[in-house]
Image (spheres, helix red, strand yellow):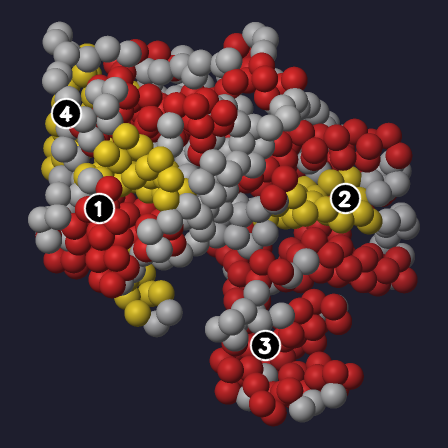
Amino acid sequence: MTKSALQIARAAYQPKLPAALKGAVKVKEGEPTQSVSNQGEICKLFPNTYGLPLIEFVPSGKGGDYPAINVGVILSGGQAPGGHNVISGLFDGLKRMNPASRLYGFILGPGGLVDHNYMELTSDLIDEYRNTGGFDIIGSGRTKLETEEQFEKGYEILKELGISALVIIGGDDSNTNACVLAEYYKAKNYGVQVIGCPKTIDGDLKNEMIETSFGFDTACKVYSEVIGNIQRDCNSARKYWHFIKLMGRSASHIALECALQVQPNICIISEEVEAKNMSLDDVVTYIARIVADRASRGDNFGTVLIPEGLIEFIPAMKSLIAELNDFLACYAEEFSHIKKSHQRDYIISKLSKNNSAVYASLPESVARQLTLDRDPHGNVQVSQIETEKLLSEMVATKLAQWKEEGKYNGKFATQHHFFGYEGRCAAPSNYDADYCYSLGYTASLLIANGMTGYMSSVRNTTAPADQWVAGGVPITMMMNMERRNGVMKPVIHKALVELDGKPFLKFAEMRDTWAKTTDYVYPGPIQYFGPTEVCDQPTKTLQLEQGK
């Protein structure tokens, strides 16, 4: 394949490892663990993998004798920078313990396990993908491993290939599935270990033992670079307000991290909107006031960062969407016969008073998206809603009203952006290259030491890499019970932005200043070569959380 100059140079990069992993290791066991909540229910569902101790790998005076083993690996869910380095670290760890060990990749995610679609990952192939972005070495998919039929079908190919351990690289849902699979194989005495690795650019898979999910660092640096570029343009032309939507449907970690990096005029944090019970009009008014205030000083330009999932955090919108889901499910046939030109009025006449008023306040384009763009289950596809355009249109309407009332005398022209896929497959930053390699290497040690139902854990990552702490955390420790599709299920608890956490408090302390002034920061592109303070810096979120 043809390679760029950067790809060729990056292929030679050797990721850094925690000092403890550079030689022989032994297991240091911590205290038994329990789930985040619903302890009785989680314990009952996972009798073979619940209550396991935390694991830390520490240097050992003597090396171990490791038999050759066959291991399978799956990339699950959306892409995140660094996935190839997890596989590289896993491969190198297995080969270092015993060169006869073999690694198999299942093609296009968990579906590859069920469909028996696989390939052996050899050193020649692995070397082509070290320190590269994407998941293209074996591809990814979103098949959920949930049924006994799937587990048994997967076991057939594992048995045929002599695979005794499976590593699932994914987000919270994928790792929940990994834990269910580990419990099933353990209960059946199939002799198959299952280990998870924490992946998601959204940053919502984290806790006291998982400092960050891999890919978050790189994705936020990519987004911050382009936001910085937009802000430089914004401050040069001085005539546009840029409304920028960022990935993060379930949490606002990306928006918050980017705000800390680039210092925009406005950043909306979904969790704060929900906590303050803000209406859509409250959010619009907040933005419009800052626009008007800047206009009064002659600054008719600025930047607004918006999390992808904002709409679902606005209580009134959440209520409207829930009623729309129920109504359109019941009256789909009747609704399909209503003329398009009359559909809006039809919906307004059928909804409850409060939800009807909210729906009537929406711009025509957004109202149409709420009723026409449905997923296969008939639900509103919230991620498809162009929230950035919704807010800018409503702000424009508010400002026009204020202009008539003599409260505003500026100009309001807008540009819209959505940054999502651009960050998911970028070449990993040094931080993610090192972190992911360490996660994969740690997974190989968890396997070698007989663990199952664990997630690979690497901590203390704001320190130099040789001071990082590697080990494993039982996946059941992160679980609680949540309602999914009307049924209570065990799932990994999503980490939302903590409004009393240091990253948000730092943002809250600075945002009024950023709103008034034009104090943009321009991070520039990810640096792979140069001073460590430029190339190896972790996210602002991690630095603030760990007091660095």
Name the N-terminal-most of marks 1 and 2.
Answer: 1
Q: Residues within 10 Å of mark 4 (few under 14, many from 20)?
A: few
The residue that label 4 is drawn on is: 67
Which of marks 1 and 4 precedes in the sequence? 4
Nearer to us of marks 1 and 2 is 1
Please state which of residues 479 and 13 is positioned toward the viewer in this rendering.
Answer: 13
Around disc 2, counting alpha carbons within 10 Å, would you say few (fewer than 14), some (14 to 19), or many (20 or more)?
A: many
Q: Residue at x 61, y 44 (%)?
A: 420
Residue at numbered disc 1: 160
Numbered marks: total: 4
At numbered mark 3, what does the secondary structure look like: helix, strand or loop? helix
Give the labeled residue for mark 2.
242
Between disc 2 and disc 3, whose residue precedes? 2
Q: Which mark is residue 421?
A: none
**C-beta proximity under 8 Å, tags 4 and 3:** no
Disc 3 to disc 1, how far (Cα)?
56 Å
- Residue under label 3: 355
Residue under the point 37% across and 69% down: 485
